[in-house]
């Protein structure tokens, strides 16, 4: 079992049933409160049951609720709390939120995976970036970044365009699927079709285990803002934008990509 029980909860989130997810979210957002709670109290505040809390504890590798609280006490003793949502200093509260998301994202990224993704992007004949809703906006941003580096990239942000593109792919092409949950049906179906055509599939998501990651050759994990108790200004795409910045910097280490980027800058902002 992971020594950081909160990380274990985040990684296991997709495997929880709805009521167990309610417990998980409360624990992640109020870890210091929970470590002082009896099992009946946690069940009450999450509108679940003692049996649900016990199942939740076992799913994250703990023998019992008591064992879970011991693990939680270790983490919360070492961890610096995120400022409360009712903080009087709104600007500081927002700054701390983004610092926390970046720090958690850094923990999830590793250079080997980033290097693999960069190599796949550079070698691909065509790159398609799939995303729905807010993830679609991120897909469009990544398309712009890649295009300005001289790469042939297309953002697909609806189910029809994804499937049409997927049906025409070859083994020389790359599909990057963006889905925080890893369960976006439209993206998964298009990714499965693209894989049947021989294309390489890379996923950007928050969970190691999902239908999307099962379809992907490479998975890049990002932090999910769902695990921060921020009702007023949660930006679900912030960790993804951080990842895109990281990949852009790595890609620009290639002199050819850097030269193409410089050329596009000179066209847009001529001296």
Image (spheres, rainbow, N blue to C red):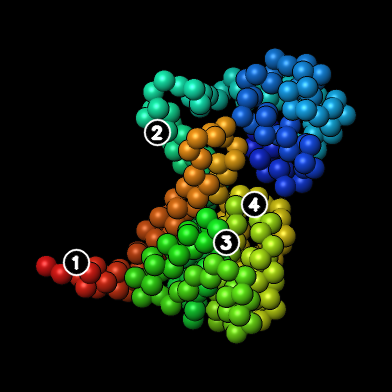
Residue 94 or 213: which is nearer the viewer?
94
Where does the image place residue 139, in percent across and percent down from the top left? 49, 63
Q: Earlier in the sequence, mark 2 or mark 3?
A: 2
* Residue drawn where x is 72% and y is 60% of the image: 211
Report which residue position mark 3 lands on.
132
Q: Nearer the viewer, mark 4 or mark 3?
A: 3
Q: Earlier in the sequence, mark 3 or mark 1?
A: 3
**Left or right, 58 with reference to 221:** right
Q: Earlier in the sequence, mark 2 or mark 4?
A: 2
Q: Callout 3: helix, strand or loop?
A: loop
Disc 4, disc 1: CB below 8 Å?
A: no
Residue 111 or 56: which is nearer the viewer?
56
Report which residue position mark 4 lands on.
181
Structural distance between the alpha carbons of marks 2 and 1: 31 Å
Quick one: label 2, few (<14), some, or many (20+) residues within 10 Å? few
Residue 77 visible in this rendered orientation of the protein: yes
Q: Is residue 219 above or below residue 168?
A: above
- Of the numbered discs in the image, which one, if any, rests on residue 269? 1
Residue 115 visible in this rendered orientation of the protein: no
Q: Nearer the viewer, mark 3 or mark 1?
A: 3
Report which residue position mark 2 lands on.
95
Structural distance between the alpha carbons of marks 2 and 4: 25 Å
Q: Earlier in the sequence, mark 2 or mark 1?
A: 2
Q: Earlier in the sequence, mark 4 or mark 3?
A: 3
Quarter of the image that includes the N terminus:
top right
């Amino acid at each position: 079992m992971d020594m950081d029980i909160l990380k274990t909860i985040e990684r296991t989130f997709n495997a929880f049933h709805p009521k167990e997810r309610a417990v998980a979210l409360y624990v992640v957002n109020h870890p210091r409160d929970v470590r002082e709670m009896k099992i009946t109290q946690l069940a009450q505040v999450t509108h679940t049951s003692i049996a649900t809390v016990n199942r939740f504890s076992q799913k994250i590798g703990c023998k019992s609720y008591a064992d879970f609280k011991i693990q939680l006490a270790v983490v919360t003793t070492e961890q610096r709390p995120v400022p409360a949502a009712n903080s009087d200093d709104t600007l500081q509260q927002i700054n701390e939120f983004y610092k926390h998301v970046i720090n958690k994202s850094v923990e999830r990224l590793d250079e080997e995976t980033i290097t693999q993704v960069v190599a796949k992007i550079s070698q691909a004949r065509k790159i398609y970036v799939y995303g729905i809703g807010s993830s679609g906006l991120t897909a469009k941003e990544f398309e712009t970044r890649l295009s300005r580096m001289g790469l042939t990239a297309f953002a697909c942000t609806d189910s029809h365009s994804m499937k049409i593109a997927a049906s025409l792919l070859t083994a020389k092409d790359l599909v990057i699927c963006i889905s925080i949950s890893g369960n976006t049906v439209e993206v998964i179906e298009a990714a499965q079709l693209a894989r049947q055509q021989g294309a390489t599939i890379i996923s950007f998501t928050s969970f190691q285990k999902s239908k999307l990651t099962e379809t992907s050759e490479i998975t890049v994990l990002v932090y999910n803002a769902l695990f921060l108790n921020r009702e007023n200004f949660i930006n679900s795409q912030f960790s993804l934008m951080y990842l895109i910045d990281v990949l852009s910097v790595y890609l620009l280490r290639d002199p050819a990509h850097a030269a193409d980027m410089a050329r596009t800058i000179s066209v847009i902002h001529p001296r």
